[in-house]
């Protein structure tokens, strides 16, 4: 019987996609349970079907009001151990977050691995050294993989399933507004791509759909689930969009990505595709500022012109050899 492993990744879609190579490798050696947000189940059915997923929206991952303790789901927290099926042989989190460490302590595990912060090493049975500050998020999973003697390098990413049509998927959404490049700039890029002879499909978040329809994009898609998003990605040859979960998902499925970064650092969160490219926003003394901007709007993205992006994007498309009718 395999030992029981609990993996905690309570944050965004992109964070969970980055963890996929670890989850696939761990499932070969452990009976893996993943505690994550509800979309983990859809990801698991596609990419790591032997991993058991348990849904949990941690109150400290909320964008606003995360420390209003009276709003926390205390009853769910008190019964989470029973829902998970008792204690584990090993439990871990790839975040240097004492809240995660307290949670795995409460759930119960013989070994508790993680990256300590503000004294949380007293909770962990095996504190690990964090990667260098400039490291990509995948490096944290690699450290955990090494600690469990897993071979992440042997876990291939899925092969692309695009039909070869050369369609470009432009997704204008993101998890938070400050990661969104202005929609009128995206429209300009879509029009230029079509003028260049490319087939383009627009996708967006729910709050952007009306804008795209008013701009003449009646066929704009609004994927609200992981399967709907994957359906669009599977029929695309290239993904263009913001620093977002959809960009990471596209890269993991084998689709080259062109990603616009604003408040975050691409060194930390670039989608993991060997042909992918990132466009870095304007300098700001407060970078990286996560999802909270000190200005009325994110100047790091607001001040990036469509002309600047167009130059970089056409070079990227030429490099990945996406055909166009004009070619």
Image (spheres, rainbow, N blue to C red):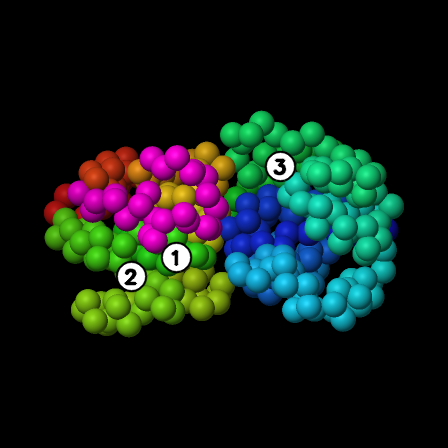
Q: Nearer the viewer, mark 2 or mark 1?
A: 1
Regarding residue 148, the answer to whether it shows in the image is: no
Q: Does 130 sit left or right of 110 as displayed?
A: left
Image-quadrant location for residue 190:
bottom left
- Magenta-span inclusion, residue 194: no
Q: Mark 1 sits on what residue? A: 177
Please count the marks in the image: 3
Q: Is residue 50 above or below residue 267?
A: below
CA gap between label 2 and label 1 equals 18 Å
| Label 1 residue SS | helix
Quadrant location of the C terminus in the rendered image:
top left
Q: Nearer the viewer, residue 136 or 121?
A: 121
Q: Does 159 sit left or right of 184 as displayed?
A: right
Q: Which circle marks residue 199 in the picture? A: none
Tell me where the magenta segment starts and ends, as one range: 283-307
> How many C-alpha atoms fall within 10 Å of the one at disc 1: few (<14), some, or many (≥20)?
some
Q: Residue at x 75, y 64 (%)?
A: 77
Q: Residue at x 80, y 67 (%)?
A: 79
* Image location (x, y in percent) of residue 249: 47, 52
Q: Mark 3 sits on what residue? A: 140
Q: Is residue 123 above or below residue 201?
A: above
Q: Does 23 sit left or right of 169 as displayed?
A: right
Q: Is residue 111 above or below residue 210?
A: above
Q: Mark 2 sits on what residue? A: 202
């Amino acid at each position: 019987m395999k030992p029981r492993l609990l993996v905690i990744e309570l944050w965004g879609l992109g964070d969970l996609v980055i963890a996929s190579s670890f989850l696939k490798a761990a499932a070969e050696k452990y009976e893996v349970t993943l505690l994550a947000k509800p979309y983990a189940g859809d990801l698991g059915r596609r990419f790591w079907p032997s991993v058991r997923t348990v849904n949990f929206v941690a109150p400290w991952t909320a964008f606003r009001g995360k420390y209003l303790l009276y709003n926390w789901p205390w009853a769910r927290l008190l019964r989470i151990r029973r829902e998970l099926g008792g204690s584990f042989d090993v439990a871990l989190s790839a975040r240097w977050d004492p809240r995660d460490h307290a949670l795995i302590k409460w759930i119960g595990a013989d070994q508790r691995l993680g990256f300590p912060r503000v004294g949380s090493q007293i909770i962990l049975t095996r504190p690990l050294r964090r990667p260098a500050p400039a490291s990509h998020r995948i490096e944290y999973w690699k450290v955990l993989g090494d600690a469990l003697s897993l071979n992440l390098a042997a876990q291939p990413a899925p092969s692309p399933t695009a039909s070869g049509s050369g369609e470009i998927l432009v997704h204008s959404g993101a998890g938070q507004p400050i990661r969104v490049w202005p929609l009128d700039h995206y429209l300009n890029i879509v029009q230029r791509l079509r003028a260049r002879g490319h087939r383009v499909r627009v996708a967006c978040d729910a709050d952007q759909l009306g804008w795209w329809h008013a701009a003449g994009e009646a066929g704009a898609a609004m994927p609200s689930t992981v399967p709907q998003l994957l359906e669009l990605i599977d029929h695309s040859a290239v993904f263009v969009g913001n620093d977002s979960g959809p960009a990471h998902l596209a890269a993991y499925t084998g689709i080259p990505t062109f990603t616009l970064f604003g408040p975050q650092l691409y060194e930390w969160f670039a989608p993991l595709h060997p042909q992918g490219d990132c466009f870095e926003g304007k300098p700001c003394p407060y970078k990286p500022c996560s999802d909270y901007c000190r200005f009325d709007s994110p100047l790091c993205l607001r001040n990036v012109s469509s002309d600047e992006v167009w130059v970089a994007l056409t070079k990227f498309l030429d490099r990945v050899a996406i055909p166009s009718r004009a070619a």
